[in-house]
Amino acid sequence: MKLRFFVIALFILSSSFDTSAQDEKLTRLLFVFDASNSMNATWQSDRKITVARKLLSESVRELDDNPNVEMGLRVYGHQVAIAPGKQDCEDTKLEVSFRPNNGMLIERTLDRIQCKGTTPIARSLEKAAGDFPECPDCRNIIILITDGIEACDGDPCAISRALQRRGVILKPFVIGVGLEDEFKDTFNCVGNYYDATNEETFENILDIVVTQALNNTTAQVNLIDDFGKPNESNVTVNLFDENTEMLEYGFVHTLNHKGNPDTLSLDPIITYRVEAHTIPTLVKEHVKITPGQHNIIALDAGQGSLVVKVAGTLAKDVSVIVRNKGESTTAHVMATNQKERLLTDFYDLEILTLPRTNITNIEVNQNKTTTITIPEPGVLNLTLASAGYGSIALESGDDLEWVVNIDSSNLQQQFQLQPGKYKLTYRSKNSKQVIYTIERAFTISSGSSTNLKL
């Protein structure tokens, strides 16, 4: 025997979310109502259909005077009676289209509906997605009310996932009434599950769902320093819808005149991924906003400064690859003689001098500047009698460390090299035997030029 229960699922159709204009947007609520045969069964004080009509009608009546709300009604399971071995899985219809002040029409429609057929939840959701007329600035919301699991071949979980990936709906809320514990996990793939155990709970949950659908709530992003204070600021913060990957809110973090982070107005229906573009970027996932209260989104974002200086005035700026200590992934690329704010941590630096300079275990501390100074390079002025092939290597004891290849088409070349002993290996293009290879040792000193002619 098929398990029956009340379920309310809340879906949001894709719309541009702009908190600066959110209060002015039209919110459109589409109620998708289950009128299948099982709604005739008794639950609490009356039949399921009677309880559902009463509570939904009360909500519709309260919403009808709101100038920023329009409502519609889709019903399923009310046109074709179910029979042994036979059910109509296309039994779903938009009964009341969107228009202002149509609450009375929705109530009258609910009163005349008779519960007859089956429960085509997936098909109804597919159809409901197309019930909203074009309106790029509207907030389009679907509230599905049903007393049974999917009775046809459709898969509500698959429909939900597909529509979320396409940005048509957000992850739904699911509220089950009288659902046994062993079946509650069935709806985790559809949305966020809530359990209503009686009429009062059902009414409260419906009020909460509608309130969340109509109202934003406040929040602030606290960037916490190493002293536990929300004093970090002036970085870009992006809030993404975790399900659709769409950017919902982007801003440059600031502190107001009282030294507090500015207050944001956010949609509490959305589960967010928060990215603070510190260096490296901070990411906080699965951020849920609690309606009706001020929310604080906190990220540990203590920062200090790092500057890599090159001694003297001869050197050109070179790039510095910054990695978290012991990691191979690049966290940032900065230039020498340029101060950068980094998260407090230990870092390894690869400075793209010739040869490359590697410095490990550099600590960046809160509100302090860590300064690394490397030696001033020297200059090699290389003159070739004829174009050829070759390279420069650094002598390190008995080993040679390749540094750079020479330009095979240029007779006059210049290289900035770090202080040390080097060896040039060269062969003219016109020489076709290895015995014509020339090796020359030379020394580079900081701030000095070395001339080498071949």
Image (spheres, rainbow, N blue to C red):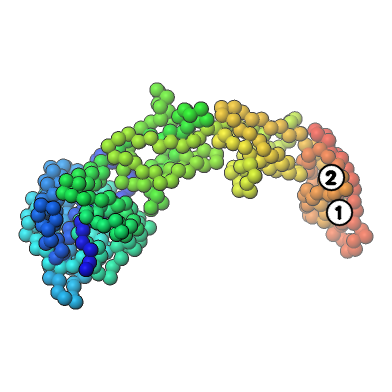
Work out whether residue 55 can be spotted.
Answer: yes
In which quadrant is the N terminus drawn? Answer: bottom left
Task: Give the mark toward the camera: 2 or 1.
Answer: 2
Residue furthest to the right in view is 435
Residue furthest to the bottom in view is 85
Helix, strand or loop for disc 1: strand
Residue 152 drawn above or below residue 23: below
Task: Say which residue appears at 14% left-offset and 56% top-offset.
Answer: 43
Residue furthest to the top in view is 258
User: Can you tell which quarter of the image residue 80 is in?
Assistant: bottom left
Work out whether residue 341 can be spotted.
Answer: no
Mark 2 and mark 1: span between their CA atoms?
A: 20 Å
Callout 2: 10 Å neighbours few (<14), some, many (20+)?
A: few
Residue type, label 2:
Ser
Across and down, in percent, residue 41 comes to 13, 61
Residue closest to the eye, 342 or 300: 300
Horizontal side of residue 340 vs 165, given as left or right: right
Residue type, label 1:
Tyr
Dot placed on the residue nearer the N-terminal end, 2 or 1: 2
Residue furthest to the front in view is 181
Circle 2 is placed at which residue position? 396
Circle 1 is placed at which residue position? 426
Helix, strand or loop for disc 2: strand
Across and down, in percent, residue 72 comes to 17, 54
User: Can you tell which quarter of the image residue 159 is in?
Assistant: bottom left
Task: Say which residue appears at 79% left-offset and 50% top-offset.
Answer: 402
Label count reads 2
Residue 336 drawn above or below residue 244: above
